[in-house]
Structures are given as C-alpha cells and as structure tokens.
Amino acid sequence: MKFSTVTLAAVPLFAVMALVQAAPAAAEITRSTDLGFVSRNEVVVSASPKEVWLALISPATWWRSEHTWSGDAKNLTLMPQAGGCFCETIPEVDEPGRFTLQGSVEHMRVVQAYPESALRMIGSLGPLQSEPVTGVLTVAISKVAKGTRIVWEYNVGGAMRYEIPVISQAVDGVMATQLAALAKPLGVVEMPVAEPRPVEPATPPSEVAPSARPSAGAAPATAGQGGAKAASTPAAGAPSAKAPATPAKSLPAPAARPSAAPAPAVPSPAPKPVPKSPSVDEAFGDLKDGKPG
C-alpha cells in the first residue's frame, strides 16, 4: 500500500473501483460494520504449494513498490517464523546538502507460519497504522485439481477516523492488487466453480417420535366425550340417584412390604480424552470452502 501523505480516504471513488476491478480473482468485502471490515480475495495458480510459499515469503520480488514507504519493494523483508517481522528498511540518505540515518517500518508481525499451508500476520497496513485498529492477514494455501489455491483475507477491527464504506473498498482494492502481483508469475488459472451444497431431505414419517403418533387403541376425542355422557346416564332398572347408598366396609390396608435396598451404583470410569493432532485444515477450515462465518 502506498503510504504517502495522501490517505486512502481521500482517494476518489472511481480510483477505488479501478483498484477493485483490476483484481484477476474473486475479491469482495465479506463483512462490514461500524467497527471494522473483512476483505477476502482468492486466486488459483498453476504453481505448486512449495513454489507459492517461497514466493509469498519473499515480498521484495512481488510486492508493489508504489505501496511502500520507501518507494522500492526491494527494501522489504519477511521472517516466516512466529514473532518474525514483515518489515521495510528506509535507506539512509547521503547526498550534498542532505544526510539522514537509516530507518525502518514494521508492517506486520508473524503469529503463525506453516510452510506451504498458511501464513498469518497481525498489523495495520498503510493509513490504518495511524488508527487504533488491529488487522489480521491470513494467507491460506491449499492444493486443488487445477493447481494451488491462495486465499487472502484481511480482517480489520477497531475504531477509526475513516468512513468504513470508503476505506474498506480502498483496502480491498489494494489487497487484490497485491495478490494479483503475487499470483501473476506463478501462473493464474481459471477459478474452479463452487459445487452447490446438498439440500438436507425432510424427516420421513417413519422417523416421527412415537409420542407424536396416535395410539392404536385410542378412541377419537368426540367418541370419548360421547362415552362419558352415556356413562353418566343411569341405566334402566338401576336405583335412583336419590336412594341412599350402602356404606362400603373399609378394608384394612395391606402391610407395606419392605423394599430391598438398591444396590450401590458403581461409577463408570471417565472416558480418556482422545488426543487431537494439530491440523492446518482445522485451523484454516473457514477459508477452505465458502465464506467465513
């Protein structure tokens, strides 16, 4: 990203759209709120994952010079280790009438480097560096039928002085430009068509819970109501309701039998936790198919 005195917020809208349209692959803002946005770009190249990885960790060979502080991408370095720096050297100036010492810029810091699979860095790029925001750049590499897929996602969150609809489109355009520069020498191929997700079938009647089915011997509600009325009507020859009823002799209640003491429950042994092997597919599953949730 060109980090001059002109901020991306001042870029005209037509220039922002030109950046977005210049991307040779899928590019979009997948999320936008009052406190951040997510820029997602992807491309498929014919190179192998190893070739993609070696190119990715060498930004001096592909990063656009107009998107640097020094004006020259050759001043960029990236250490692909946790804690490593994606940095830029500001060369010293020693010329008649002007002399400066060497400077430097930290663009991002590496938090995960998984060779040939994923690179994740944290940092606020370009004009976002002056704002109290955090940006997480995740680059996921995966093998596909036509070559290697590169997913480039920049997740920015925090309060900023820029208008989100403007800055998000500008940053997304620059991210697409950088990915295009990385992919071009690796051989861009046609994006694979995403397969439609299968529609889950409706629950068949045979799987309806037994409680939801009417019991086999149950009579209809109307029949039950009618039967109750019939039972309340005295039969012919039966004594009138006014006739005194013969008191029934109370029978002594049977003695309660002592119940056998329940056997003490034997606690079952707790299941042993199954060790979970680390997997890049799990760590970056949200970047494999579809959009992040």
Image (cartoon, rainbow, N blue to C red):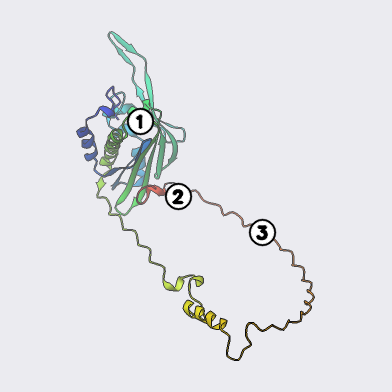
Q: Which mark is residue 269?
A: 3
* Disc 3, SS: loop
- Residue 247 % position (x, y): 73, 81
**Which residue is nearer to you in this view: 190 or 286?**
286
Q: CA–CA distance between discs 2 and 1?
A: 27 Å
Between marks 1 and 3, how big is the CA–CA gap? 53 Å
**Considering only vertical position in the picture, is 108 above or below 90?**
below
The residue closer to the viewer here, 261 or 252, is 252
Which amino acid type corresponds to the residue marked 3 in the rendered image? Pro
Residue found farthest to the bottom:
237
Position of 24 with respect to 40 (left or right) is left
Q: Is residue 20 above or below residue 222?
A: above
Seen in the image, is 130 located left or right of residue 170?
Answer: right
Question: Do labels 2 and 1 touch, CB within 8 Å?
Answer: no
Residue 249 appears left or right of 2: right
Q: Which residue is mark 1?
A: 125
Circle 2: element type: helix
How far apart marks 2 and 3 lie (CA) works out to: 30 Å
Q: Residue at x 36, y 36 (%)?
A: 34
187 left or right of 254 in image:
left
- Residue 175 picture quarter: top left
Task: Using the image, determine if residue 218 lies above or below residue 197.
Answer: below
Mark 3 is surrounded, within 10 Å at the Cα level, by few (under 14), some (14 to 19) or many (20 or more) other residues, namely few
Q: Quadrant of residue 105?
A: top left
- N-terminal label among 2 and 1: 1
Q: Which label is found at residue 282? A: 2
Amino acid type of the residue that numbered disc 1 sits on in the rendered structure: Leu
